[in-house]
Amino acid sequence: MHSSPGRSRGPARRGRALTPPLALALPLALVLLAETGVALSAAPDAAATAPAPRVSESAVPKEEVNARLTAQAQGRRIEVVEARTESTTLWANPDGTMSVESFAGPIRFKERGRWVGVDLTLVRHADGSVGPKAHPRGLRLAGRTGTAGGDLAVLGRGDKELALGWKGALPEPRLNGTKATYDDVLPGTDLVVEATRTGFEQYLVVADRQAAVRAADLTLPVRAEGITVRQGQDDTLTLTDARTGDSVGRGTTPYMWDAGAGGENAPGARTARVDLGVTERGDGFDLRVTADRSFLADRSTRYPVTIDPAVYFGTDFDTYVRNGDTADFSAGVDLRVGREWQKGEARSFVNFPRHSSVTGQDVLNAELNLFATWSDSCTPRSWEIWDTGTASSATRWSNQPSWRSKVTTSTQTHGHGDCGPRWISEDITPLVKQWSKTTNTVDTVGLRATDENDITAFKIFASAQTTTAPSILVTYETPADPVKDHVVYWNDVLQETYRQVGGAPGPLARAGAMMHGAVYDAANSARCAEGALKCLGDAYLVKATATNGALPDVNSAIDHAAFEVLRSLYPTLNFDDEIAAARSTIPAAVTTAQRAAGTEVGQKAAAAMIAARQNDGSAPVAPYTGSTQPGYWRPTGTGDGATPQWGLVKPFGMASSAQFRRPGPAGHTQMSALLPSQAYADQVNDVKSLGGAESTTRTADQTRAALFWANDLDGTYKPPGQLFEHTQILSRQHDTTVAGNAKLFALTAFAMADAGIVAWDQKYQTDIDLWRPESAIRLDGDGNAGTTADGNWQPLSQDRNGQHFSPPFPAYVSGHATFAGAWSKATQAWFGTDRITWTATTEDPNALGVTRTFTTLSAAAAENAVGRVWLGVHYRWDGTDGVTAGGDAAAYGVANKLKPNAAADWTAYETLHNLTGCQEVGKRLVAEHRWSTYQCTQVQAPGPDHTLYVK
């Protein structure tokens, strides 16, 4: 898992729970699109959840591609500035991944065509007014005013503007961060205005009952340019565009609450609804706020009292709901979770805008970031994060979005005393992985306490209106360019060809060796054109040159080498779309002459390979029908013996097809000696016990392993394709370059092609063409007292219809095992170690979704081999001798083909700017077997330049 890049945390903020807690609340919300002026209703609805399309590399904006390249070159994350939105930021990471952070509220806005970061710190202006340093909705607050009063707070500009007024004089406000306090606007009452991310909160702090009498009935004038108002039955307000009639905002339910038993900085306040009256007038409307006088006079009410209208513009939305309340709490700074003292349980919902870059991606990591402002204690108490439906202004306890699935449970508890306010991060990767498969524009998380009756589990998080808005940070793998690495691309095409043509594995392995051998010669020829030192190593068949004198484009050379070989081998298949797709991604900077030169080099490499394999012994021969004599192979219902001539095919790396022939099962070379032996009886009884369809001795894991490695059926990539897939995995893990892959895949392909020849030589060209376990176990007549026939025995191996079968060729040696042994030895030689950990899957239809993890290459080969015993189609010696024969063939080919460049003495390769850069290039040249060793020498002290020497 890639780790997420670190995020900058904002300063701790004391939320509503930490402000004077006796409140008469009047939240008023206006929702507008700041940039376009298009009206929206409360919260945007999620789009239809159709499967998300996979983003193609060709669709990736140029700016993102450049950011990726810069991040990798500079070793630091680079923001894709062109991808900025009000609430999201996209970065390219040095490891090639991308990260996007989405906030529940805007973190920046556009001003005069440039992005400006939100800064809510209040400052005084030259005209005496007050305002945040940078506010997305242009918030402006009053300075000192005369007795006639005026606008207290103004949001918006132009034809969409909302101004909340104050009747009476206002003193010069005291500024403290995001708060402006106007002292004694009424006797015993202060007026506080706090800038929020998209608006403001205004509240009156009423000191005592005498002051509350004067503040219990207030009229707040609202000037609304281009906006009309309608009052709902629940005292909410609906604001509409006076010209279009579209909904542009809302006013939430007015409320008041007292200080509660916990003191002025603690939750637990008593609450009461406040009556709201609306009187329209020419330029807006008046809001008459009437408090419950009996609540204010009640001796249980704890002072001070606060009147709290909150106003904001924007499309962000979060809220909480509380059992027993029908109020809209969406305009506040709190997200409450759990049961508050003497109140019903609360749950919160946060809508996050979906950044389009996440849709359809491979999500690696996702974290939800919340700022905890309150907890009743520091003792950890459990709370949960859920995937929910989209929240809106209509969300109430009795009308909650659907709670779809629980994502995770957390016990992180902060906000109280020694565990004071701080950021909390929780892993929500599974949820965001699920989201990425849909085309939603808004994603929503729900927060709730695990035990909603436990008052000690009550928590408050900061809402989108605060300076510490919730966010989600997602790191994802960018979609692979289908032809970014042209070697791997054509290997994928090869594997798809395997699925279409099917058949015995020998011809498939031959095709792989021909294609990848030609690809290597093509890539090597193109690099050699840059100078002899730049060659990848020895040519396999040809070092081609281009007649136009241009430097050949390596990718064009690879493309045409693969294309020409494949269409020669499979003339009934059409590879035109594949070559077109490959050519379309070659950068525009590659000139026409370079493309032409690369094409010519590739075609020459292909022609040389095709010519070399003419009359190589692979042509079909007469069917092999086997024998009816005990011990000798006979058909098992899957046809005559397949490709009996394959042991005579000309090798790719070996000196001869019989070069690594094994002595025979347990050293026996004659059937007459083999059948009566104890070793034979032991082998038969071994597979009889472990490999039967109804075996009770085979473990569940052995069954999974057997089916994982099977891939005997047409329509799968067969054994060579599965091992090519493992090669791709290892290549990616080691960041192998295109040039390195050209040689790696060629050496692997040669090894597997020779493995097929070795195995089929042993199967058909020796005196022991051993029958399959199916025949040995079901038929009587081997003359061995240690075996007992079972006519009902069937191997585990089965086709797509559940019919059990054995592959149509002799058992000794195992083709699967020989391929695996060759692949293991070739990859060990390439990577210089046996100890590599990787995880892979399979295409066998009876094991779809099964994955296996390996820690050594040899262990994978050994499991492949013994898996054939568990599958019931081979004896154990088929596998052990097959692995050995394949490994010997591969070792010989690696030692004698595509050898690295060589020089008698140290030879200057190139000069690089610094020592680290020189060492990295040198390590790559050695790791990819282009040169055997390197050293870096400083050009001239104290300059940083170093010359890379190789030999």
Image (cartoon, rainbow, N blue to C red):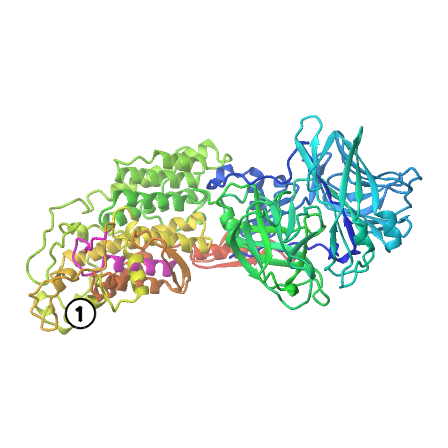
Q: Is residue 719 left or right of residue 657?
A: right
Q: Is residue 828 magenta?
A: yes
Q: Is residue 316 above or below residue 660?
A: above
Q: Is residue 362 left or right of residue 703?
A: right
* Farthest-out residue, right: 147
Q: Is residue 766 magenta?
A: no
Which quadrant holds residue 209?
Answer: bottom right
Q: Is residue 941 left or right of residue 791?
A: right
**x%, y% of residue 469?**
68, 50
Which quadrant holds residue 281?
Answer: top right
Residue at image coords 31%, 61%: 705
**x%, y% of residue 180?**
84, 48
**x%, y% of residue 801?**
23, 50
Residue in the foreground of this view, choosing between 306 and 551: 306
Q: Secondary structure at mark 1?
A: helix
What residue span does the magenta drawing correspond to? 802-830
Residue at image coords 60%, 39%: 44
Residue 892 appears in view: no
Q: Is disc 1 surrounded by few (<14), some (14 to 19) or many (20+) residues within 10 Å?
A: some
* Farthest-out residue, top: 243
Q: Is residue 159 above or below residue 89?
A: above
Residue 175 appears in view: yes
Q: Which residue is mark 1?
A: 685
Residue in the foreground of this view, choosing between 932 and 659: 659
Q: The residue under label 1 is which amino acid type?
A: Asn
Count of number-bearing discs: 1
Image quarter hosting the C terminus: bottom left
Residue in the foreground of this view, choosing between 591 and 84: 84
